[in-house]
Image (cartoon, helix red, strand yellow):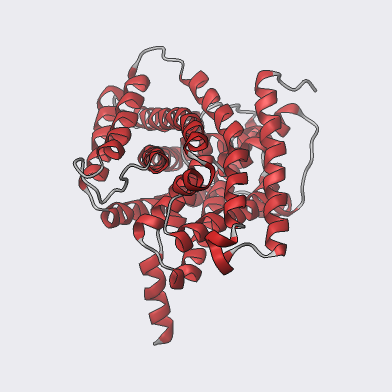
Amino acid sequence: MKLWKNILFFLSVMGPGIITANIDNDASGITTYSVAGARFGYALLWTLIPTTVALVVIQEMVARMGVITGKGLSDLIRENYGVKTAFFLMVGLLLANFGTTVANLAGWAASMEILGMSKFIMVPAGALGIWMLVTRGSYRFVEQILLVACLLYFGYVVSGFMAKPDWVPVLKATVVPQARWNSEYIMLSIAIIGTTITPWMQFYLQSSIAEKGIKKEQYKASRLDVIIGCSITDVVSFFIIVTCGTLLFPHGIRINEASEAALALKPLAGDYAYLVFAFCLANASLLGAIIVPLATAYYICEAMGWEAGVNKTFREAPQFMWIYTLTIVIGSLVVLIPGAPLVSLMILSSVVNGLLLPFVLVYALLLINNRQLMGEYTNSRAFNYISWGTVLTIIVLTSFLVISTFAPLKV
């Protein structure tokens, strides 16, 4: 009886952690993992273990702040560090998130074209669908839809088993680091971390926890939600790398986009595997196109002190709804422009994200250790060592990624 009671209690809290982590596997993330598998086989699988640990550490802190304070991260930055600091941070995040939104809508367009549908029909249809979902649905309804959609990520797990890899080298590569002093290998290692831990995730997770109204007594269940979500997202990443490492790498097939991976799988693994990969890309892209604009609307409105929330109407939270609407509309129009510099926009977005992530994480750590704000829920000394170590590592790696974008590594 107690077990069922605990399960029902967890189900009432579950959502923000699982959704945030899983939807981080958007079009950009899937592209990174597909390219990693196609170019280096299983050699980059080991990076997923430290990345998962780092993701859990950071997301748990942010979730704890949301539960204890009942406020979003932008709210706390504005209240503790001033409107000017929050404003400049939000401008950078707006630019980065717009590029990420375009990347997700471009992924949706590419997957629809693989499935034989015109992007000029499906991009407006997809944009209208997700706009209606958020502006007309309640928070609870949107969360339930997103949780169901997260289950579709397991299609990548299916494709991994369908690839029929030799599991001994797969498992060995997962636990034994394979360092290579190769510029492309180093860049993809950093990209895996960069696409897994992003600024928008921290804002969306904390805002969604605050809007859902998760209380202090529900903190342990919320922490479990985060741990499960972070674990699932990297299990999915693992199987994407395994699929491409098994089927594309031995044939020397080089790809630059997740949609290219789906097409390349068709002659090697048959229609079913290729369709699973394409369908999962469509699902991930559309979910990313929902959540990233939502995160944008949340943190800008919180930073400016405006009303925010999916449960609000256009009349109650006009700025929130208009930011969400315009991000989707303008992003869709950019994707439909013939010859639009989508790749350049995505690269710029990655660079801005890389520049902003250290600032976001440092503010999060300063806030989580503010005893006036968090009371007894500040970090322990041991957790601070892990947290600051994780943040410093991410700062070094993202700095390297940003610098090498402008001055490519020569090896």
Visible residue check, residue 23? no
Q: Is residue 381 left or right of residue 295?
A: right
Residue drawn at (64%, 52%) of the image = 54
Tell which of 174 and 79 is nearer to you: 79
* Looking at the image, residue 302 lies above or below residue 329: below
Side (left or right) of 173 relative to 55: right
Residue sitting at x 41%, y 67%: 215
Furthest toward the bottom, the residue is 1
Quadrant, the N terminus: bottom left
Question: Residue 358 at x, y = what percent?
Answer: 63, 39
Judge whether 335 appears above or below 306 on screen: above
Of residue 114 and residue 141, the one placed in the foreground of this image is 141
The spot of residue 217 in percent (x, y) is: 45, 73
Total marks shown come to: 0
Q: Is residue 116 above or below residue 189?
A: above
Position of the C terminus, as image quadrant, is top right
Q: Residue at x 56, y 28 (%)?
A: 352
Q: Percent position (x, y) of residue 292?
A: 41, 39
For the view shown, which residue lies furthest in the top direction?
339
Is residue 307 visible in the rendered image? The answer is yes
